[in-house]
Image (spheres, coloured by chain):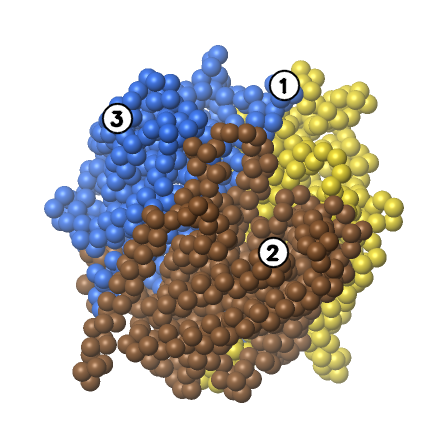
Chain colours: A yellow, B blue, C brown
């Protein structure tokens, strides 16, 4: 009893303290290490010809904004499908991403742009930080509703580091290509979240079962997330590609792939649904699998047909996963997966990595022309054959799965520390544990409870 | 009875089969015909000077994204005003547009960019495909709630072809100018939908009357659609214009026209409303008429005043249409128009076409300078007088109305094929026919489990 | 009684007449004065080298669109948190902003771009007009729910003029730098609204108290506003900066500042909340204070650390303001502040102005290099020392506060004219006064009232 009441007192202060400590620490690290890069620092700017740098900016800034919308609006609202967890879905997405982008600016900065004792930041660091935040939010989707904000911040603290290291190993050490992050973002984020979910397995979650579904309007809020993710995915996959034909081809491939995954999702959802009815869960999620599956190969010579075929396959696998595999994942593997990230990010991420292996293995000088230099620099420079590149891509997938699993194992230990703000089994998927929640309907809101509230609503 | 039960069985498989067949067929056609264009194909890229091509891209890609948002978020949520049809509005928009953009890539490709046996795709084909999807969604608005997804896909199959042919006749054969599609998109889409609605007339629709209205929050979801359409309409109208002063002028004209249609809509809505109250239907729809009305003339020398006047007129006509004309359309012409597309797209589209006739007829070398070449190439090259251009514009309107009407007549035959998934009169405007629908409120969703609630609400 | 019934009749016509008169007057002024500028007019375009002008466009147009989204989606939905005032929040935002952008095009045109008897409009005038609309909407937030649309249009009529004059005094006469408008937009808009709210003080507002809170889904709609404001604030602050390193640095600073204000808001909200629970009001608003606080200094050499520190401070002050200062503002100063604009725009705006004083005072040739010319032209040209610039910045803050207060005093007289459409104390925060409102739930919507409605809803 004494322990539990000490926990209660500590719980009240955990979130404020963690936010303040994390923000204080990043601020100090920023003060010591972070500097504007050459394109952002006024004293370094007005020298030489800037037309190439400007061209980058005209493309990257709108791309960045699209990615930014995906991370905060897309992921946040997509997870708002739960009937009583909308505040947490949108709010914790906001908190986690705001922390992750600062923290990953530091981690990625140390790994990728640390020169002369300083990290140099600019447009690219903003895009990369948002990408990392995306991976953290994918993991959040797996454990959505079963963890408190303190636990989530601790998860982000760890995951951002592992994301950075894994990405560094893949892109810088192994020379793997993965512009849209089928491996580094989707596969990593999904399996990190799933292994973490295994570590946090709750055998008595049926106590909260009545809150695991949606209500009519929460499904429409979720569709806001879905549609913005779908719309801006071409920007997501093309944001880090080399200027020229690359961004165009990547955007086009992603656009086709997504349109095909949408059709296959509707087809399969109606096919496996009761009475031929469509299931909103499939539409909200599986229709997006086309964006995941071309994350690696979108910048390559996938061809428009290849993009359609890949998207079609991804939508199919993802919808079938929701219907048949998610229940097995819980009953056999003790992995609870609230948003079905295994279906949207896990399996399509692995498929996307394998597609990358295939398309990289087929790369020829003829097909890519001078552009081979930007898409496969190591092949262009003669350091690797296409087959060798393909094998490196495959190795990248295994490295990613290893980092994600081992990292999430550590994460499980961290998130099971005593006294953290994990909700009891009967209060999962419930905003009221962490938020002041008004009545659902105006009638309720007008009741006697109002007397307590003037100072909070101001 | 036997026929009806055979129908029921077939209905269950219609949507999956149609999606799979359509997706399979487009994929095969893509494999055979569709290739990256010169700016998107790596092997064709690194030759020559790309600065102009790049400039196009810096403008077109953000424009494309804005148009993309309008099509999927704008149209989808605008139609979500119905209290029990939000899943279908947003979901079928998603399905229809995803199919239409693939199919129109093929149709428009055969008509506009078929060289050496191949269709060449890139940024322009993406914008054009989204435009065509917009026309399909306008037609969807007319019959919203009274057709099933199979019927809608069949409509899209036909309408995309007719849209492409009509556009080809106008732009390529007649030399009509119509950048923002007052004719090719709005007039065509609206009258196609309205004639189709006539063909599908339901005399006993009052059985579903109680579901034809909105509820409080569904109107707010619809406002998401309205506002995003309103905001990005300057990008819509300017997306296909020639780089230079054109996009700027088009965006500016559209911005002014929309702001004026907003004021006239508020004025008229309060004027004709009971007790001077505003009507959400008007605000959600008629305020957008300013974008439709400058679709043709936005790139021309409309002048800022002209844009305001046009927008003002369009908002007025549209609001009055909702109040006085829509009921007549149903009672006298047997045309049911769920979203009032006649008021938002039909009449303002025709007005826009006529405004284009007027402004084209006033074109002079003096007013346009060297830019006459991009706005009216045939006048600049001396092949046509301004008056002749104006007459061609007028002819374009009649051609469009003809294609839309005849095409929709065919469409009516197609959609009345036996055994399609048309809802019964008593189940129109109801998601539950096609979707698994959760309870509206958490109480319903929780059912008897509710008894456990006390500890969660504590 | 006779007077009151005359008022009732007049009230019914006020809004339509005011909209028509305002739109008519702006249209006439547009006809007389407004012309396309050189980049927008076809006859003036095809001369000389346009690469710089084009570069501006590739950056400004996407920036403009982001600002546009903030004004209409951001402000509109942010204010939709009230349970029964969503139509008015989103709808009146739409109306006010549509009028303000036309009217401010004229006012700012007379002050800034009036040459040869004409106002020249283009991309910059669009951005500036949207900025001015933003200030009007901030003031709207202070008096939200306690004024009718006629009153709001009158407020906009006055405020746009004062905004223009104040901005002209600051930027053109005093040489103050304020790219993101900590002073000209946020401080001005907030104190204009607060002083106006004082003038319209309602001692018996507790009659509407039960409608001042949110309901569950209205808070989610408000989060749409919050997130879009948060996402596009980097574009807002950088939109008017000089092309080159300026936009990059401003965007980066704003991005960091916002991420820090998000963390400090979560920390403080949980710290001061009952039982450590988070308060949606704080998250929806205070998390945005980081964008306000770097409005002035974002384009300067704030450094990444400085941006984090500023954002952290702003989030803290803003959250504490909501908790402790808003009640005092009402009880002691008789200022009712529905959205807490004092906390989100007022105090952070003043802090931002002071931060600008500090950072300007530290400006050196060494730190800014050649770019000093764009950030502090008067220092670069040797007309001012950094200290003098700092003092001018401070003077700018006092000028702004004076204009806002005196102007809002006048505004109070204007809005208290007899017979305007102010709601009675018992009907504040209630859409039904101004809108046809459907039932909240479908069950209600199916009630007997429905029989009157088919022809309007069509």
Q: Position of residue A10 (x, y in %)?
A: 73, 76
Residue with the mark numbered 1: B48
Q: What is the CA distance from the residue labelled 3 to the residue labelled 1?
A: 41 Å
Q: Residues within 10 Å of mark 2 (few under 14, many from 20)?
A: many
Residue plotted at (65% across, 68% down) = C394
Return the residue nearer the eye: B32 or B110: B110
> Dot 2: what SS?
loop
* Residue B116 visible, this angle: yes
> Dot 3: what SS?
helix
Residue plotted at (62% across, 50% down) = C241
> Dot 1: what SS?
loop
Front tag of 2 and 1: 2
Front tag of 3 and 1: 3
Q: Badges 2 and 1: C-beta atoms under 8 Å apart?
A: no
Which subunit holds the residue at mark 2?
C
N-terminal of the pair, mark 3 or mark 1, is 1
Return the residue nearer the eye: C152 or A189: C152
Residue with the mark numbered 3: B387
Which subunit holds the residue at mark 1?
B
Q: Is residue C130 left or right of residue B134?
A: right
User: Residue farthest to the right?
Assistant: A116
Q: What is the CA distance from the residue labelled 2 to the residue labelled 1?
A: 40 Å
Figure quadrant of the N terminus of chain B: top left
Q: Is residue B138 above or below residue B158?
A: below
Q: Position of residue B86 (x, y in %)?
A: 38, 53
Residue plotted at (46% across, 30% down) = B242
Task: Say which quarter of the image contains residue A9.
Answer: bottom right
Q: Is residue B429 left or right of residue A403?
A: left
Q: What is the CA distance from the residue labelled 2 to the residue labelled 3?
A: 48 Å
Residue with the mark numbered 2: C179
């Amino acid at each position: 009893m004494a322990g539990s009441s000490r926990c209660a007192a500590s719980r009240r202060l955990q979130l404020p303290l963690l936010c303040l400590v994390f923000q204080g620490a990043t601020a100090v690290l920023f003060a010591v290490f972070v500097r504007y890069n050459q394109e952002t620092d006024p004293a370094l700017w007005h020298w030489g010809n800037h037309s190439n740098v400007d061209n980058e900016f005209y493309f990257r800034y709108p791309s960045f904004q699209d990615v930014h919308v995906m991370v905060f609006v897309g992921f946040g609202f997509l997870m708002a499908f739960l009937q009583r967890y909308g505040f947490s879905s949108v709010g914790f997405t906001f908190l986690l991403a705001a922390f992750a982008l600062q923290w990953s600016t530091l981690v990625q900065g140390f790994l990728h742009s640390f020169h002369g004792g300083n990290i140099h930041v600019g447009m690219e660091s903003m895009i990369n930080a948002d990408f990392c935040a995306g991976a953290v939010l994918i993991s959040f989707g797996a454990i959505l509703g079963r963890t408190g904000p303190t636990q989530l911040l601790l998860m982000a603290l760890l995951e951002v580091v592992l994301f950075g290291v894994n990405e560094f190993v893949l892109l810088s050490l192994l020379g793997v290509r993965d512009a849209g992050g089928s491996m580094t973002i989707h596969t990593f984020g999904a399996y990190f979240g799933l292994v973490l979910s295994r570590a946090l397995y709750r055998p008595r979650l049926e106590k909260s079962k009545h809150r695991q579904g949606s209500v009519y309007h929460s499904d429409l809020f979720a569709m806001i997330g879905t549609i913005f993710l779908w719309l801006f995915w071409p920007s997501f996959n093309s944001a880090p590609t080399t200027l020229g034909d690359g961004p165009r081809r990547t955007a086009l491939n992603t656009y086709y792939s997504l349109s095909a995954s949408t059709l296959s999702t509707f087809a399969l959802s109606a096919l496996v649904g009761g009475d031929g009815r469509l299931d909103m869960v499939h539409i909200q999620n599986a229709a997006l699998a086309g964006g995941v599956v071309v994350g690696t190969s979108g910048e390559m010579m996938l061809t428009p047909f290849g993009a359609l075929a890949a998207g079609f396959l991804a939508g199919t696998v993802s919808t079938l996963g929701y219907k048949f595999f998610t229940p097995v994942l819980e009953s056999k593997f003790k992995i609870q997966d609230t948003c079905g990230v295994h279906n949207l990010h896990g399996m399509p991420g692995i498929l996307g990595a394998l597609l990358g292996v295939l398309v990289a293995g087929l790369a020829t000088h003829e097909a890519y022309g001078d552009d081979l230099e930007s898409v496969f620099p190591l092949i262009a420079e003669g350091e690797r054959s296409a087959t060798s590149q393909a094998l490196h891509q495959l190795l990248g997938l295994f490295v990613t799965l290893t980092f994600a699993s081992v990292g999430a194992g550590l994460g499980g230990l961290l998130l099971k520390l005593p006294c953290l703000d994990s909700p009891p089994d009967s209060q999962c998927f419930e905003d009221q544990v962490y938020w002041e929640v008004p009545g659902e309907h105006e009638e309720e809101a007008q009741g006697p409870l109002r007397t307590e509230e003037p100072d909070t609503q101001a």
